[in-house]
Amino acid sequence: MKRNQAAAPHLLVSAIVFAIYLLSAFNMRGQNVRNTDYGPDQALKSNARVNPSTLAMELSIPLGGYSGRGGNGIPLGVSYSSKLWEMAVHGQWQSGTGENRTGVKPVFAKRSAGGWSSSLGTPRIDYELQKYRGNNQEVTYEGEGYEPAPWYPKPSEDLFTIKRLRVTMPDGATHEFRASDAPLLCGNMNTTICSLDQTGVYLSVDGSRMRLEVGPSSSILYLPDGGRYLFAPGTNPGNPAHTFYDRHGNKMTFNTGSFTWTDTMGRSIPDLLPYNWNGTQNQTVGDDQIKSYPGLSGNYNLKFSWHYLLDPNGEGVCVKSCGIRFLRSLLSTVFKAGF
């Protein structure tokens, strides 16, 4: 009797499983089969995104490209980032009541053309020297960037710097290189003269695996894939590269006067955008910049136009009447983008 009672639950479970199987077999023809292979979330692609680190809206617009020897080609395209503004120290002074004041000013698109950068640009070395306070008992100011205050009595306090450089790539990304992390003496508050020897071997500190060798007559930027860029001598901010070699030794040259690449096939490929550095916007508002590019059956033209951004709530009212000027870019019939 006990054995039959123990077997009853097992029989009940088996009956339920058998009933479910029969129901699924009868309803098999009525199921609505949906294939998500070509759904919108799979088929639609875009180069626009929000950078998770900077929260900037970024987009890239490819316009073509030129293949060269050994896979060494030149891509043709533009990129945009909404991170346009930064703050810079404008000056220091004391108010009429003796309060210390520090003025800052906004800097617009310091190293881009209104937020736009081109794949046809060339790397640039920034030799900007930054001074820091140190070697004093004021822990608050240890390692702080130094800006002279005209009213403050200058003590004989030493200033220091770090032997580092920054390189801005054609896509607008900036990489930091350091020759050493050791602080170097860089004058003092009474003597602001600091002659730092910037030659040496610099390694990237951001995981990009690049090496920069700065010499008295030339500088070389080594890429992780074996390619390298060559720079002319000089320490002016924005020193551009003039030659590129890929890992196979194929050579491309960049004319720093006309901003034009000559690739491994001898084709002349001009940069779309003006050469801007340190916040100087060299694009001409209202004029069309027409560039000619080699094609399969002759050259074709691309037109890049710069205009003031119009007020979306007003019919053709330019926001420059409010004292603020913005730019937007229009590239012939390829795309329209504003900011």
Image: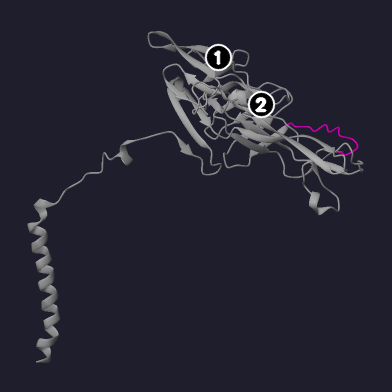
Residue range highlighted in magenta: 188-199
Dot 2 amino acid type: Gly
Q: Residue at x 66, y 34 (%)?
A: 166
Q: Is residue 189 magenta?
A: yes
Residue with the mark numbered 2: 279
x and y percentages locating residue 88 in the rendered image: 71, 35
Question: What residue sits 70% from the left and 39% below the top?
Answer: 179
- Assign the magenta stretch its main secondary structure: loop
Q: Would you place residue 282 above or below residue 220 in this image?
A: above
Residue 33 in the image, given as x and y percentages of width and height = 17, 47
Q: Is residue 298 above or below residue 130?
A: above
**Which residue in the rendered view is the most extreme toward the top?**
298
**Coordinates of residue 24 in the picture (x, y in percent):** 11, 59
- Read off the residue under disc 1: 286
Q: Quadrant of residue 199?
A: top right
Q: Which mark is residue 104?
A: none
Q: Crowding at label 2, few (<14), some or many (≥20) Cα neighbours within 10 Å?
A: some
Dot in front, 2 or 1? 1
- Gap in Å between the C-alphas at discs 2 and 1? 20 Å
Residue 236: quadrant of the picture: top right
| Residue situated in front as seen by the camera: 207 or 214 | 207
Q: Is residue 326 left or right of residue 134?
A: left
**Disc 1 marks which amino acid?**
Gly
Instruction: Let me know if residue 173 appears in the view.
Output: yes
